[in-house]
Amino acid sequence: MEKEPKRKCNMSECSYERLSSQEIEDIRVLAKKGLSLKRISAQLCVPKTTVYYHVKEYCQKMTHINLSALSEKEQGYLVGMFVGDGTLIVKRKQGRYLTKFALDAERDKDIADHLSSVFKKAGKRTTRYVERSSLTFKVYSKEFIEFLLRHVMCVKQEDSRRKLKILTNPEKWTTAFKFGFVSGLIDSDGHVYYNRRKTKHFGVLIKTADDAFRDQLTEILTTLGIEATTYTAKQYKKSYSKKPRYVVYIPTNELERSCHRFLATKLKRFSRL
């Protein structure tokens, strides 16, 4: 019977000592939250080889992503999800390349399931966990970030911690990629209106604080043969930001003509549309 590694922590040096079941569980909990082997090792004073021994079946950094296994529509969907709900954390010296998606824990489980299935098709393991009302979805991959940055430019703002996301050459995207991109935006930043019986939809609303992105999105929709309307959202007294919010609205008749071409989970939540 194979013996488990032992651990003994003395200042910054770690040797081996048998781990308790609780210590093993602590390692797995941190790994599921997306911490690297190095960080778990330092935090719990456990050798990296020992950490890997207990988490190797779902260790995020041990899988590579094969984006060519995805259709153009699925690739576009990932870019749309990133533009709507994604964040990049890149620390090159530490070799950390993380993409995070922030979803609603109560309403977006089906979206997280779909997102997970797309990454699984590409051969990439992912992590997701719930914190309060947020469902955090993590992907560790340098290749995936490089893919995103070929389609989206992230620009720092002087008066905000958030970065502007500007689409790169969307006029060169294929029709399938564009439909996928809009699908990802609907699932992240979009709201689908339904009648009270939830048997028919009444269009899609997508909000943005960036007028340049608003213009890029409406141009993409125009090339897809979809006529959207735009307007400035009403400002509320309790709003945390005084900046204008722009709305891109896809009307009912426009959506009905092309609904079957989208991948958006929010459009598939009810069988009779």
Image (spheres, grey):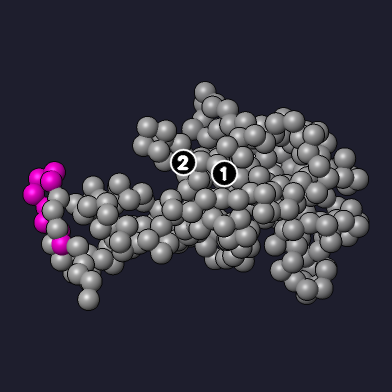
Mark 2 touches mark 1? (CB < 8 Å) = yes
Structural distance between the alpha carbons of marks 2 and 1: 9 Å
Residue 182 visible in the snapshot? no
Asked if 252 appears above or below 210 in the picture, the reply is below
Q: At 33% across and 50% down in the image, what residue appears?
A: 37
Q: Which residues are magenta?
A: 6-13
Q: Position of residue 18 (x, y in %)?
A: 15, 66
Q: At 49% across and 33% down in the image, what residue appears?
A: 161
For this orientation, the residue located farthest to the top is 158
Q: Crowdedness of circle 2 by 10 Å Cα count: few (<14), some, many (20+)?
A: some
Residue 159 visible in the snapshot? yes
The number of numbered discs placed on residues in the rendered structure image is 2
- Residue type of the residue flagged with mark 1: Phe
| Quarter containing the C terminus | bottom right
180 to the left or right of 92 = right
Q: Crowdedness of circle 1 by 10 Å Cα count: few (<14), some, many (20+)?
A: some
Q: Which residue is mark 2?
A: 97
Q: Position of residue 59 (x, y in %)?
A: 41, 57
Q: Position of residue 151 (x, y in %)?
A: 67, 36
**Closer to the camera, 115 or 239?**
115
Asked if 241 appears above or below 270 in the picture, the reply is above
Asked if 22 appears above or below 14 in the picture, the reply is below
For this orientation, the residue located farthest to the left is 10
Q: Secondary structure at mark 2?
A: strand
Is 8 included in the stretch rendered in magenta?
yes
Q: At 22% across and 52% down in the image, what residue appears?
A: 47
Mark 2 or mark 1, earlier in chain:
2
Residue 112, quarter of picture = bottom right
Is 16 included in the stretch rendered in magenta?
no
**Closer to the camera, 210 or 19?**
19
Q: Which residue is mark 1?
A: 144
